[in-house]
Image (cartoon, rainbow, N blue to C red):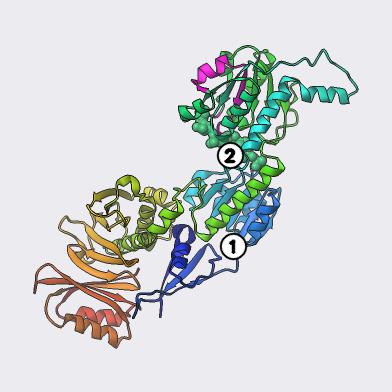
Amino acid sequence: MAASASYNLLSTPSLKKQISSSSLSWRLPLSSTFRVSIAAPRPKRAATFIVLAMDAKPTVLVAEKLGQAGLELLKGFANVDCSYNLSQEELCTKISLCDALIVRSGTKVTREVFESSGGRLKVVGRAGVGIDNVDLSAATEHGCLVVNAPTANTVAAAEHGIALIAAMSRNIAQADASVKAGKWQRNKYVGVSLVGKTLAVMGFGKVGSEVARRAKGLGMHVIAHDPYAPADRARAIGVELVSFDQAISTADFISLHMPLTPATSKILNDESFAKMKKGVRIVNVARGGVIDEEALVRALDAGVVAQAALDVFTEEPPPKDSKLVLHENVTVTPHLGASTVEAQEGVAIEIAEAVVGALKGELAATAVNAPMVPAEVLSELAPFVILAEKLGRLAVQLVAGGSGVKSVKVTYASSRAPDDLDTRLIRAMITKGLIEPISSVFVNLVNADFTAKQRGLRITEERILLDGSPENPLEFIQVKIANVESKFASAISDSGEITVEGRVKDGIPHLTKVGSFDVDVSLEGSIILCRQVDQPGMIGRVGSVLGGENVNVSFMSVGRIAPRTHAVMAIGVDEEPNKEALKKIGDIPAIEEFVFLKL
Ligand SMILES: NC(=O)C1=CN([C@@H]2O[C@H](COP(=O)(O)OP(=O)(O)OC[C@H]3O[C@@H](n4cnc5c(N)ncnc54)[C@H](O)[C@@H]3O)[C@@H](O)[C@H]2O)C=CC1
Ligand SMILES: O=C(O)C(=O)COP(=O)(O)O
């Protein structure tokens, strides 16, 4: 019988790669959780992986209009439910049947949505940049990955910004409405020129820098404010980075391109309008919430702000009687920044690829609430990822009582410089191994740190830099649990902590130390650890008890501190021995203690 282990897709990001690179049989996992059966490696080491799909296909709910190419891509992998304009209640009802949700800016993905998903929702894809409509903390707490499509609509948003600057400065929208109303008001709609005017780009990221580049082409003098943008990137396109106050007080035009965060919320307010040049013009293609809209109405009425052009609003759609929208010096569009044919096709493909990749267990490069680990790093870390989870599982099962674990120290021994070894994935998997056997919580790369913190589990990491070739990412991983008693006293090392250590040998994780005893047993199946008086015949006696109960032994290894004193025997078993078999092992006179551990 094959031993089996459950993996969550998000926690085993490179499993697929690992499987295919070993020419193993692979059937696409089509559910959010799937079962991998690993036949014990006898008589050869070549393992057989059989992936058993639990559901037919994952279900992706597309809650807002998405480009056709993206939909086709999704349909090749999942059941796709396109349901637009859902109420919050309808969304919460549907979500419990969905593995992934794709939205644009019009859907609020609230905590309630994650709670209603009952743990099934594994990925939220935001088909665009801004993720302010997704409750990221709730997503993380529920172990749900959030991915976005950050690049495909950049140019569209920048072009819309330029279009609004030009339209506003020449009164295009107002003049158009006037002509259509039968008027011919040439004197009323005299505009202002752009050439030679100072444009302050607030937020010099992807969109902001494209706006800057285009505005320079129009002959504008461009300055920018962005506390996090590198000065050399700005210099490269001839833009000077300045302070917030300098930007807003010297600009003739201010264009907003920062994300909506607690720090940027209402960043343009009464106080900042008071510092602006009289007659300044404001453009917002970022998020409505970065402007205090009531303060903007006051600044428009006072003539401090001559005109504003707005694509985005605090509330979308804005109230029909919004003073801001109806203001004669304001030009508005209904959040059209990303709405070009080209951008929507691009965004749809970008998000569909990210969501499908995440459902397959690959980590999307555009993950918003999880570490981004490049594919090549993932593939080389794959066996260590499995080792890490198993060490965590072993260590916590050695704790007497199991629940008092508060302080865990992880040591990574590697010949690689710390900068060349990203351990976040390994740490997450150790956390998963530590928490899952003693709780009903489901842990993955997204929620590992959060879950550990929530449970008061402090994980400290230490690196040992080894001499030698940095070809292998890691030599060994050691997990120590402090301040606990062990149900297997020999697992407590000289330093007083439960200690387990493992290595990867020929691509297979091995347990190589328990407490102060060196052992060597492949981490497949389950393990029995016995401490015995070191004397001849012990392996045979334990082996024959297990054989008598039809339990197949895959590995055995004895570690001792000195001959004929005490030894620890680690026995890998394919099946779980029944109580009777375990009792018989315990009854062998030289056995001082033993423990059965599930991997
Ligand atoms: N209207 C629309 O349809 C669209 C709107 N957007 C919005 O445009 C904004 C920018 O998008 P991207 O350029 O793609 O994002 P990005 O992440 O590339 O750039 C944002 C920049 O804002 C900067 N920033 C952060 N806090 C700041 C602060 N307090 N002051 C000044 N700068 C700050 C960041 O350092 C970053 O460089 C986002 O809010 C996004 O949601 C993007 C695409 C379409
Ligand atoms: O990408 C963004 O941030 C946008 O604001 C675009 O929003 P949308 O996808 O058009 O609803």
The secondary element bearing badge 1 is classed as loop
Residue that carries the numbered disc 2 in the rendered image: 130
Question: Ligand 1 within 8 A of label 2's CB?
Answer: yes
Q: Position of residue 94 (x, y in %)?
A: 64, 56
Q: Position of residue 43 (x, y in %)?
A: 33, 81
Question: Ligand 2 within 8 A of label 1's CB?
Answer: no
The kind of residue tagged 1 is: Pro
Is the residue marked by circle 2 packed among few (<14), some (14-19), or many (20+) residues within 10 Å? some
Residue 406 visible within the image: yes
The secondary element bearing badge 2 is classed as loop
Q: Residue at x 27, y 62 (%)?
A: 502
Residue that carries the numbered disc 1 in the rendered image: 58
Mark 1 and 2 residues: CB-CB less than 8 Å, in contact?
Answer: no
Q: Position of residue 362 (x, y in %)?
A: 49, 57
The kind of residue tagged 2 is: Gly
Q: Residue at x 46, y 28 (%)?
A: 232
